Amino acid sequence: MRDAIRFRHLFIVLCLIIPACGEADHQHRNHEQLAESAAAPDSSEVMMPSGDYPPGPYGLAVGDTVDDVSVFTSQDNLFRLSDLHRNDDTQLLLVFATAGWCSRCREHMESLSALHAQYVNAGLHAVVSIHENSNYQPATIRDAFFFRRQYDLPFDVLADTDARFVEFFDAFSPPLIVVIDLKTMVVEHLAESWNYDQMVDLIVAHLYDE
């Protein structure tokens, strides 16, 4: 008799516990699902373009709209074309792409700095972009830092490890010159040599004759 009573009590307790456990497990799964939903990014937000940057298609030839390039500077800051595009004080980007082993490129640092000083207030934004260091290895932020310090450059030096400014050309034979209209983000000029007078004419025509 006592065994029957004990069995009945045990049965009642189990009936009460099992549904409660099931409910707790259900609530636990709901909480996990809510947490996962909150942690997962909205795909529509991920695909949104940054700011008012011009949409594609993008290209690498003169007349093409250029993609939003992002590289690091000698100061370990992020350099982005979209930031320059949103800056009302910048109108034209001049990229001097070089390498640490390019001896002839060093000869042009003085004239490039002079060009920057003359037209920076009119909207010119000049940068040096290093793709390889003196050992023919991909340039690092450290390489960019020492390059800028060596030539006492008054503008950013970029560590173009992934060759973002080199891909405008068929081969890497520095110096390589890229000029981009920062309002339309259209490639205005590409050259495989440095011609100071040509650059002056191009800059003046773009900044003053429009």
Image (tube, rainbow, N blue to C red):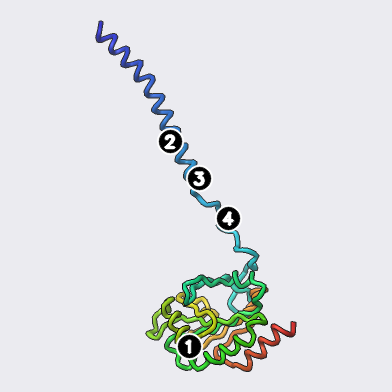
Check if mark 1's residue and mark 2's residue have beta carbons within 8 Å. no
Q: Position of residue 134 (x, y in %)?
A: 40, 86
Give the Cα distance between marks 4 and 2: 29 Å
Q: Which residue is mark 1?
A: 151
Question: Of callouts 1 and 2, which one flags the residue occurring earlier in the amino acid sequence?
Answer: 2
Q: Nearer the viewer, residue 133 or 151?
A: 151
Q: Quadrant of residue 28?
A: top left
Circle 3 SS class: helix
Q: CA distance from mark 4 to mark 1?
A: 42 Å
Q: Amino acid at mark 4?
A: Glu
Q: Quadrant of the N terminus?
A: top left
Residue contact at pointers 4 and 1, CB within 8 angstroms: no
Q: Secondary structure at mark 4?
A: helix
Q: Under tag 2, what secondary structure?
A: helix
Q: Where, by quadrant of the figure, is residue 119 drawn?
A: bottom right
Three-letter amino acid code of the residue under disc 3: Ser
Residue name at image x 47 percent, y 81 percent: 130
Q: Residue 45, which numbered label?
A: 4
Specify the label residue 28 is tagged with.
2
Q: Mark 1 packing: few (<14 Cα in 10 Å), some, or many (20+)?
A: few
Which residue is identified by label 3? Answer: 37
Q: Which amino acid lies under the numbered mark 2 shown in the image of this protein?
A: His
